Image: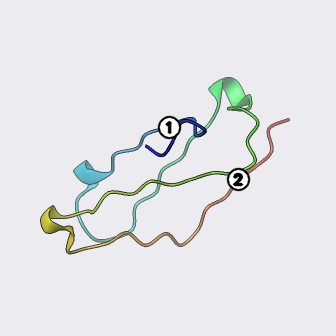
Amino acid sequence: MPGPSWERIAAIDTVKLGQGGKHASAVAGFRGKAIGTYRWLLWVLDPVANGGTQGTFLTEADVTVAK
C-alpha cells in the first residue's frame, strides 16, 4: 500500500476466477451510501501469475456519485 496519505477502501481478489477471460468486480457502499469523499483513486495491482509474466489490463472503471 502506498504512503500514509492513502486510505484503503477495498481489496478484491479475482485469482479464484482463473486466468484469462473477462472478470468484473464492484465496490459499493452499504445500502447505496457513499464510501467516502475522495479526490483520487489508486489501483494497486499484483502480477496475475508467478514470476510476473502476465499483467492486468483494465478496460473500464466507472465511478458514480452516491445520492
Q: Quadrant of residue 27?
A: top right
Identity of the residue furthest to the right in this view: 67
Image coords of residue 8 (percent x, y): 52, 36
| Along the line of sight, the residue nearer the viewer: 6 or 55 | 6
N-terminal label among 2 and 1 = 1
| Mark 2: secondary structure | loop
- The answer to whether the residues at label 2 and label 1 have Cβ atoms under 8 Å apart is no
Identity of the residue furthest to the top in this view: 30
| Along the line of sight, the residue nearer the viewer: 11 or 24 | 11
Q: Bin the neighbour count of mark 1 within 10 Å (Cα to Cα): few under 14, some 14-19, many 20 and up.
A: few
Q: Bin the neighbour count of mark 2 within 10 Å (Cα to Cα): few under 14, some 14-19, many 20 and up.
A: few
Q: Which residue has dot 2 on it?
A: 63
Image coords of residue 7 (percent x, y): 57, 35
Residue 52 relative to residue 33: left or right: left
Q: Residue at x 43, y 73 (%)?
A: 57
Above/below status of 29 relative to 50? above
Q: CA distance from mark 2 to mark 1?
A: 14 Å
Residue 43 relative to residue 19: left or right: right
Q: How many marks?
A: 2
| Mark 1: secondary structure | loop
Above/below status of 18 relative to 38? below
Q: Quadrant of residue 30?
A: top right
Give the residue type that dot 2 points to: Val
Q: Which residue has dot 1 on it?
A: 10
- Viewport quadrant of the N terminus: top left
Give the residue type that dot 1 points to: Ala
- Viewport quadrant of the C terminus: top right
